[in-house]
Amino acid sequence: MTESKLLSCRMLVVLPLLVLAGCRTYEYTPTVPSAEFEESNSLGSIEVRYAHGKDDPPTLLSAFRRNVIEPDLGFVGTYVFGMVYPTMKIDENYSSVKLKGEALGEGHWRFLIPRKSGWNGPQDLNLYFANRDLFLFRFLEGQSCLSEYSLDTPGREALQIKVSFKEPGCLLPCSPSQNDPNRCSHLWR
């Protein structure tokens, strides 16, 4: 094989990898009222009762993640003699669904727990109130735990939680991670 044919064969391999290197996607989803979310796309529902946050409906942010294989370029050699070669790395894509609570009475709301085909999760669920109170939960698929519990809040009334799933699952409160306050670090059992 001549040197020019060998070079063009290498370029046919490297060029598509360079083009694909910037193709990661992030999905933006606007806030949707929970009553308008399609129930067939849900894992079940969560009801919250919190007298302190009764002014505005809270929102539930469900985070989804999945591992993707992305092309990357490696370098081997020295500054004088070096070679760039294609490699693959595993990265993480992120998507979310944000639902506004369906009012069931004063200080009482219902959310559907969304799922997305082809994505892991929801893993972390953030419950935001207009008064800036934030509660973080982790969804565990195929496990079972209490379906009704309350979370004590310092100097305020407790947050009452009632969860019902279509299939076995568990929703546990957790502490936020130091690196990312929207991700769970320690589960409360």
Image: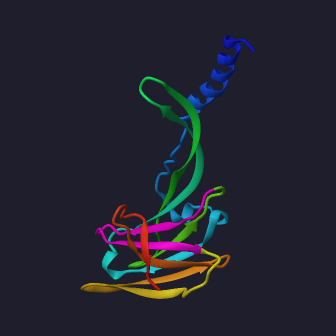
Place of residue 106 in the rendered image (x, y in percent of width and height, measured from the top left): 39, 79
Residue at the image position 65 percent from the left and 55 percent from the top = 118
Place of residue 88 in the rendered image (x, y in percent of width and height, measured from the top left): 59, 42
Place of residue 79 in the rendered image (x, y in percent of width and height, measured from the top left): 41, 26
Q: Nearer the viewer, residue 62 or 46?
A: 62
> Does residue 77 appear in the picture of this structure?
yes
Give the quarter of the image for residue 49. bottom left
Q: Is residue 59 left or right of residue 148?
A: left
Q: Is residue 108 left or right of residue 10?
A: left
Residue at the image position 52 percent from the left and 65 percent from the top = 34
- What's the image's color scheme? rainbow
> Does residue 22 appear in the picture of this structure?
no
* Range covered by the magenta-colored residues: 119-140
Residue at the extreme left of the image, as rendered: 155
Q: Nearer the viewer, residue 101 or 98?
A: 98
Place of residue 132 in the rendered image (x, y in percent of width and height, measured from the top left): 29, 68
Q: Quadrant of the N terminus?
A: top right
Q: Is residue 106 left or right of residue 15?
A: left
Q: State whether residue 176 is above or below residue 87.
A: below
Q: State whether residue 85 is above or below residue 46.
A: above
Q: Nearer the viewer, residue 155 or 35?
A: 155
Residue at the image position 66 percent from the left and 79 percent from the top = 168
Residue 92 part of the magenta segment: no
